[in-house]
Structure formats: C-alpha cells, structure tokens
Image (cartoon, rainbow, N blue to C red):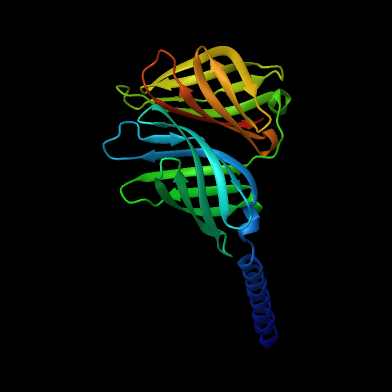
Amino acid sequence: MRKQIMTTVAAVLFVVGIGLANEAHGAGACNLQTIKGNYAGLVIGTIPGIPLGVAGSPTVTFDGVGNFTGKDVGLFGGFPNNSTTTGSYTVEADCSGTLTTTFDNGFTVPSRITISDNGAEISMLITFPGEAGTGTFRRVGGPCSLQTIKGSYAGFVKGEIPGVPLGVQGAPVTTFDGAGNFTDSDAVVFGGNLFPGLSSAGTYTVNSDCTGTLDHGGSIMRLLIVDNGKEIFGLVTDVGPLPPQVTTADWKRQ
C-alpha cells in the first residue's frame, strides 16, 4: 500500500513538474521581435451615433523594436475613409501587449493585443473610451501574384445593411483561376431568409504586397492575402449603386 501511495505521489509530482516547466518555457515566449514583419487584417468597430460604425482593412509593418507604420483602407459610417498610420507597440513575455495607433488626421486609438501561433496571428481589442471594436491580423508572407491564390477557398461573408433586419450572410466556395478570374457557388441568408444554390463570377487583382481587389458585378472588395495564400480577408470598399453598408469576408484554402 505504501509503495502504491509513493508511486502515485511521484506520478503527480512528475506531472506537476512538466506543467511548471511548460509554464516557465511559455513565460519568455514573446517579445518585440515576435511580430516583426508585415501583417494584414480586418477591424470592426461600433461608435454611438455613427450608423454602421467603422471598418478597416489595415496593413501594418512592425519594426521589431516597438514601432510600426501602416495603411488603412476602411469605412466610416459606410463611406470610404482611408488613412496612413504610425504608432508604437509593446509585447509582454506572456504574449499580451498594446498598440497605440495614430492616424494621419492626428487621432490616436489605444488597443490591447494578444499574440498566438508563434506570432502568426494577432488579436486586437480597441480600448478607446466610448468605442467597441475588435480586429484580427495575420502574418502576410509574400510577395504575391495572381497565382498565389489559385485554387478553391471556403469562405464566410457577413454584411450589415441599413433597413435589412439581421443583415446578410453567405457561405461561398470561391475558385480563383490564377489568371484574374473567379467563380463561386453560394448559399445566402438575406434578412433571415435563405437563398441557396446561387452562383456568380467576376475578376480579381493581386499586388506584390499581397493586397488586391475582387470585382463582383461592380461591387469592389479589397483583398488581403495572408499566410502565403492560405487565407484571404475581404472588405467591400465600393458598393457601386448599392446603399452604404459594411460587408466583410474571410476565405480559407480548401
């Protein structure tokens, strides 16, 4: 009996020791260099009194010593609102940190960040009083071309449209041909009503910095290609003849 108890205690201590070792290893996992490089993402925010709030599709370059520069192509109240950005960032050993973003009009926004997947992804929470906003950034990779996203992607599209209760959601399977054309099959829920079996086609562009556009019948979506083409973020920046709206997309390679 005594031997069994001692064996059990030893096993428990062994497991606890592994946990402490892992915790100690994780304690120094992140620093300013962890997110050095180019990132792109989507940011969505709500501001009282601003219909449709704010949405952005920023690209950001972290220098590894606590500073960053970027460009944001976004929407304010559903209308285009583009800006260059500069700022500073901190990173703690537990992979949390802060961003302080200054837009070219002088407006400054503080945020909290958490870093995951060895720096491949950054999650962001806007901490400016009176606003509510979140964002996700992924490491870009690159350079990119039309061929980078050749193939099929499974996606999710979400739109907020004034006067349409519940908005619009879609689950497209989109195929890019590597030469600037795409086709997709989709099921759409519009105002809570399902419209299955939809299909469409259009054109796309890709720049060397892994940004691009998708032209869907005159509605233009900005594309951000991340993780060497494994994932694509999208934000509609020109709705054409449609009313102002905020529509975002996220595709992942099948």
Quarter of the image for residue 70 reads top right
**Residue 108 location (% of width, % of height):** 41, 48
Residue 75 appearing in the image: yes
Residue 58 appearing in the image: no
Vertical comparison of 13 with 127: above or below: below
Horizontal side of 68 relative to 240 (left or right) equals right
**Residue 54 location (% of width, % of height):** 39, 35
Residue at x 47%, y 48% (from the top left corner): 101
Vertical comparison of 15 with 186: above or below: below
Vertical comparison of 145 with 7: above or below: above
**Residue 154 location (% of width, % of height):** 60, 28
Quarter of the image for residue 105 reads top left
The image quadrant where one finds the C terminus is: top right
Vertical comparison of 115 with 227: above or below: below
Residue at x 52%, y 43% (from the top left corner): 136
**Residue 250 location (% of width, % of height):** 55, 32
Horizontal side of 191 relative to 185 (left or right) equals left
Horizontal side of 200 relative to 230 (left or right) equals left
Quarter of the image for residue 92 reads bottom right
